[in-house]
Each structure stands twice: as structure tokens, then as C-alpha cells.
Amino acid sequence: MTLLSICMPSNRPWAKSRGSIESALAYAEKTGARLIVSDNSRDPEKRAHLQNRSSNLLYHSSPSEDASGNWMEALSLADTPFLLPMGDDDQIHFSEGETPVDLSSLPDDVVGIRPQTQIWTAEAGVCQTECYTIDGASPGDRLQEFTRKVMGNNSIYYSMYRTSVFVPLLRLFTQAHPTNGGYCDWSLSFALITAGRMVHDPSLIYRYDLGPWATEEGIAAASSNLYQKAGLPADSAKFAALLRFLDVHVFTLRRSLALDPAERGEVLLMNGRLALAEFLQNVRTNASDYDEVVVYLAELIEQERDIQSIFHLALLMADCIKPGLKDGYIRFLQSAEAA
């Protein structure tokens, strides 16, 4: 029985995506996994190379023009207990001599299996390797542990996850999030980690291509581009921690997240401590970067102790980023509580 689907939404033409796809297919044929390529590149050469290529490959010509829609096309084809999201500029390989994690015997409190992640750039090759796990018994402990262990990038997002957790979360995000922005990958990782522990599979090597995120100048430009593509101002990076607070708060209230009321409350408080505290510190330190309404609301939040009241004050700040964003988050919250 196939237990893992490698889900790759792909927009690059064959010449630029070939290395990624070939590596994933080799891994799938080695391990018995299935590679799903949801292709919206409209490249006939790519289609010719991949159609009917292998019993371990499901090639799908996607009608979706946008990235989010193509993600959901790929995920909708995954009928295995676990899936691995993969970018079509990354590569995966099997590490000979290492024993793979037995997916069929994982305890229920494990939501994901992270690979041996190689952070890579075209200029420098492998810059660092990340293998950390998330072991906390409670969801609040896991959020704190992730914040402590993370090494400056969100590579843990590209891990194996239980399909029953990953797909509903991504469906809620793509269908209801007010911006559906590419900058939200951090919020998605925090949301996934609330659902369970992350163990390590040393046999899976994931080569994560930093691309434009390799330099400080590239990070600034790429970040600005992500916010603009999401319909937000180019300088919205100064609101990143606030946006993450709002996102993770809403994700924590989704019905599909199997937490008891005490655990859910613990996550909401920990999210406030980790994300909103960071934002408030930024406002105190760099008050001139924010308008007077944001500064005033930040002062009110610092005096508040009830997490729901804090959330509603943070919602008011959202309209300082973009008018109407508050109402978008209210609709997002209503969708989460129903999903």
C-alpha cells in the first residue's frame, strides 16, 4: 500500500523543473511513494516527458492559473495517509544506509516527519543542514519550541504530514484567508505544529533552494513582492508579526483541529506571547514607522489581559495595513469556526 504522496504544483517549464521532478520521481520509485505533478505551465515538452512516464507518477494538467489553485489541484489528488509538499525548484533524494521512518506505525500524536533539510543556493551550494524535531507534549510547548529552534527560514514546512491535517488546513487557507498571500507560510507551519509532534526521517534529504532569499537585499525585495502580490502595501513586512498573530489565532479556532478547550486556550495565549509581543516591541522601538492609530492600539493591547479582547484590538490594527482587512479577517474567523 502506498502511504506517501509527493505533491508538486509546477508552473516552471520542463527545462527549469526537470531536475526537481526527476529527483522526486527517483525517490518515489525507490520508496514506493507516488509523485503527483499538477502542471499549469502549458509546456508541451513537459507534458510529453511526463505523461505515462511511470506507475509512480501521476501527471495532472491543471486548469488553475494561479499558484493557490494549483496547490489545491495537487492536494486534491492525494489519497494516501501522508503527503509531502514540494516546490518545483527543490530536490529530494534517498540517503542510502539510513532507515526510513515507518509511516504505518507512527503514534497518533505525530503530525509530521521532517527530512534532513539542506539549505542550498546556486552560488554556495549547501549552506546548512537542518534536522531538528519538535517534541513538546502540548501544543503550546511546541509553538515555543519551534520559535526557539527555527534557524532563520521556514524549511520545516516542506516535511511529510498527515493528509487528514494538512489538506483541511490548506483548504481553509486558500478558500477563506483574506489575502491568501505567499507570506503566510510561517503561519501555516505554526498551525501544523499545534496539531502534533514532528519527528525526523534521516533517509529523506530535501534540498531547499533559497533562490532570491539568499541575501538581505534579495529577502527585502522578495518579501515586498509577496505582500504586493497579496494586495497589501509593499512595506507590510513591518506588520509581519501582527499578521502571523491574527492568522495563527484563527487557525487555532478551526473545528478540524483536534484540541480540547484547555489546549486550544493554551495555544491562543502562547501565540499572543510569541507573535504579538514581538510586534508590540517593534512598535515601541520604531514608533515613527507606524501611524498614530497603530501606536495607540498597541498601548491598549499592552494593558489588556484577555486574549479575545487582544484579538479584537489587533483586528482594528489590520485596517491600518489596508482598509477592509479587518472585515476580511472576521469572515476568515467565521469560516474557521465552521470548518
Image (cartoon, rainbow, N blue to C red):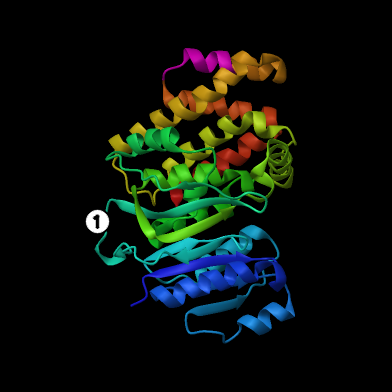
Bounds of the magenta span? 298-305
Instruction: Answer whether residue 181 is visible to the viewer in this image.
Output: no
- Which residue is tagged 1? 107
- Numbered marks: total: 1
Is 278 in the magenta?
Answer: no
| Residue at 46% across, 71% down | 27
Residue at image coords 45%, 69%: 5
Amino acid type of the residue that numbered disc 1 sits on in the rendered structure: Pro
Dominant secondary structure, magenta: helix
Q: Secondary structure at mark 1?
A: loop
Q: On the image, which quarter does residue 62 sit in?
A: bottom right
Relative image position of residue 101 (x, y in whole percent)? 31, 62
Question: Dot 1 surroundings within 10 Å: few (below 14), some, or many (20 or more)?
Answer: few
Q: Which one is in front, 196 or 176?
A: 196
The residue at the point 36 percent across, 38 percent down is 142
Relative depth, front residue between 71 and 214 = 214
Where's residue 206, x and y in %? 49, 58
